[in-house]
Image (cartoon, rainbow, N blue to C red):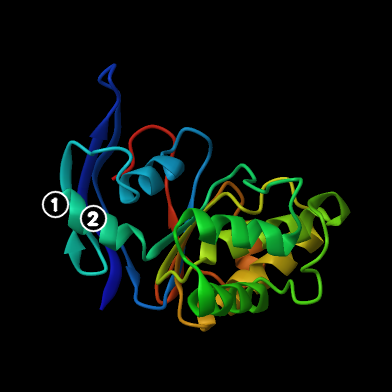
């Protein structure tokens, strides 16, 4: 069963430039798929479509079995709470500790008490930040900052995680380390769809364009279909 199914997706810019023409791919439940391509190939656009921020001009998109282009706004918001999102730019609050960042987000969502505590514990474990709860962002490495951003995306508890170009500006060693964290998160039962401009670190981690639960989907600059 697929957690994400994109079928015959079509999208054109306001200027009439066609970006996607009948693009189709799927992400299995508990799968981990990367969209790889250069700037301008539409990687982030696909994530924004899945998040309901942009509406395509054709095709069908199923997210956790629901057609996001046809569900009501209320039903979509319920579905959206099951989707974590890690944008390319860090969302970390510099004046809050690791723990404070997570608590701030959960309070903003109205999540408190035991549910919040359990969500934080799970996020800290999956993002490998146990023991760093009291640290401020300025004392974290670039790798640890990425892990904190991941922990924020995982709260309160998502079934699907969207990550936008998380390997950019990391050293090869940090790329490999962060990929290991993401793989562990996936193995814990979170379906992941990520984007990347680089394929080498993904290949090193065992991802392949041949399909399966750990796969690479190539997008090209211009029209992808």
Q: Is residue 46 above or below residue 140?
A: above
Front residue of 126 and 77: 77
Residue 68 shows in this picture: no
Q: Residue furthest right?
A: 139
Residue at 25 percent across and 35 percent down: it is 11
User: Disc 1 on helix, strand or loop?
Assistant: loop
**Residue 191 horizontal side relative to residue 94, left or right:** left
Residue at 53 percent across and 35 percent down: it is 39
Q: Residue furthest top?
A: 15
- Where does residue 62 sit, x and y in percent of width and height? 22, 61
Labelled pair 2, 1 in contact (Cβ < 8 Å): yes
- Where does residue 199 sit, x and y in percent of width and height? 59, 56
Q: Residue furthest front?
A: 113
Q: Residues within 10 Å of mark 1 (few under 14, many from 20)?
A: few
Residue at 52 percent across and 75 percent down: it is 113
- Residue receiving disc 2: 76
Can you tell which quarter of the image residue 191 is in? bottom left
- Where does residue 166 sit, x and y in percent of width and height? 62, 53
Front residue of 155 and 14: 155
Residue at 19 percent across and 58 percent down: it is 75
User: Disc 2 on helix, strand or loop?
Assistant: helix
Position of the N terminus, as image quadrant, is: bottom left
Can you tell which quarter of the image residue 6 is in? bottom left
- Residue receiving disc 1: 72
């Amino acid at each position: 069963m697929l957690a994400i199914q994109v079928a015959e997706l079509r999208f054109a810019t306001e200027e009439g430039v066609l970006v996607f023409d009948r693009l189709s791919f799927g992400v299995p439940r508990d799968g981990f798929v990367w969209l790889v391509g250069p700037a301008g190939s539409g990687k982030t656009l696909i994530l924004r479509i899945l998040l309901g921020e942009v509406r395509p001009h054709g095709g069908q998109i199923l997210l956790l079995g629901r057609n996001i282009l046809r569900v009501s706004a209320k039903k979509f918001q319920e579905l959206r709470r099951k989707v974590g999102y890690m944008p390319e730019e860090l969302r970390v609050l510099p004046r809050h500790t690791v723990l404070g960042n997570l608590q701030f987000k959960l309070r903003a969502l109205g999540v408190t008490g035991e549910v919040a505590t359990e969500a934080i514990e799970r996020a800290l474990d999956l993002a490998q930040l146990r023991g760093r709860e009291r640290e401020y962002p300025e004392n974290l490495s670039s790798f640890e900052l990425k892990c904190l951003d991941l922990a924020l995306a995982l709260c309160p508890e998502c079934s699907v995680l969207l990550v936008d170009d998380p390997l950019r500006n990391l050293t090869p060693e940090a790329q490999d380390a962060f990929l290991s964290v993401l793989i562990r998160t996936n193995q814990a039962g979170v379906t992941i769809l990520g984007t990347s401009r680089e394929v080498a670190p993904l290949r090193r981690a065992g991802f392949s364009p041949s399909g399966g639960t750990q796969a690479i989907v190539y997008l090209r600059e211009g029209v992808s279909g």
